[in-house]
Amino acid sequence: MKVKKNVSKAEDDPRSTKEKIFDVSVDLFSQKGFDAVSVREIARNVGIRESSIYNHYPSKETILDAIFQYFRKELTKMRPPGASNIEKLNPDIFKERVHRTHTLFRTPPMEKIFKILINELFKNEKAREIVLHDLIQEPHKFTEKVLDSMNQRGIIQPIDPKIMAVEFQYTTLSLFLEYLILKSNNLDTKNVETRLKNHVEFFLLIITPEAGNEN
């Protein structure tokens, strides 16, 4: 009878080990901050030797890079399918985007990575780029394009897309920021979630033709 060797998952499946390193790093970086966490501490929490970390990540900085890449990839889920075809979108896209963003940031990994981004915002150039480009500038630019298209097609009130994009996007961003801060501290988020819902409904009421016909 052959004796089955007792091989750990880390030794048996390199990808599993890499995923564990990633997950543990997300936990530790979000709890303590990137600078306060050592490779040795990551290895100890994964249950492997420190030298084994370098089989998967050349440095602690590359782990952080991988975390940021994951975050950016997940952010693409904020846009509903078909969002690339701006000419066919209707006002419901705004409600759908907020719903998708809310769903995305309710996942523990995204919540934790957002906390890492905020902690690294004034120290790490990549963190600044993600916050400025992926969370602020790009969504605002997309909103402006969508509003401009709807305006030209006459399916919303005649508005200035530049102004209304600011009104929608920056209010939404500040409410989500408040939501994430509260959630990361295990505080009640019901009030801010209600305000977020009311914000979207009010915005749709303002831009849709029905709102103007009531006057």
Image: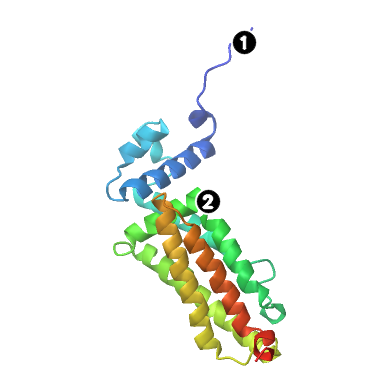
Image quarter in which the N terminus is found: top right
Residue assigned mark 1 = 2
* Residue that appears at 65% across and 66% down: 80
Q: How is the image coloured?
A: rainbow
Front disc: 1 or 2: 2
* Residue that appears at 32% across and 62% down: 124
Secondary structure under tag 1 reads loop
Image quarter in which the C terminus is found: bottom right
Q: Quadrant of residue 54?
A: top left
Under mark 1, the amino acid is Lys
- Residue at the extreme right of the image, as rendered: 88
Counting from the top left corner in percent of width and height, residue 67 is at 45, 53
User: CA gap, disc 1 to disc 2?
Assistant: 44 Å
Q: Nearer the viewer, residue 179 or 84?
A: 179
Is residue 132 found left or right of 72 in the rendered image? left
Say whether residue 84 is visible. no
- Residue at the extreme front of the image, as rendered: 215
- Residue at the extreme top of the image, as rendered: 1
Earlier residue among tags 1 and 2 = 1
Q: Which mark is residue 107?
A: 2
Secondary structure under tag 2 reads loop
Counting from the top left corner in percent of width and height, residue 5 is at 54, 17
Q: Is residue 68 above or below residue 45?
A: below
Q: Is residue 84 above or below residue 100?
A: below
Q: Is residue 206 above or below residue 183?
A: below
Q: Badge 2 local density, few (<14 within 10 Å), some, or many (20+)?
A: few
Q: Quadrant of residue 116?
A: bottom left
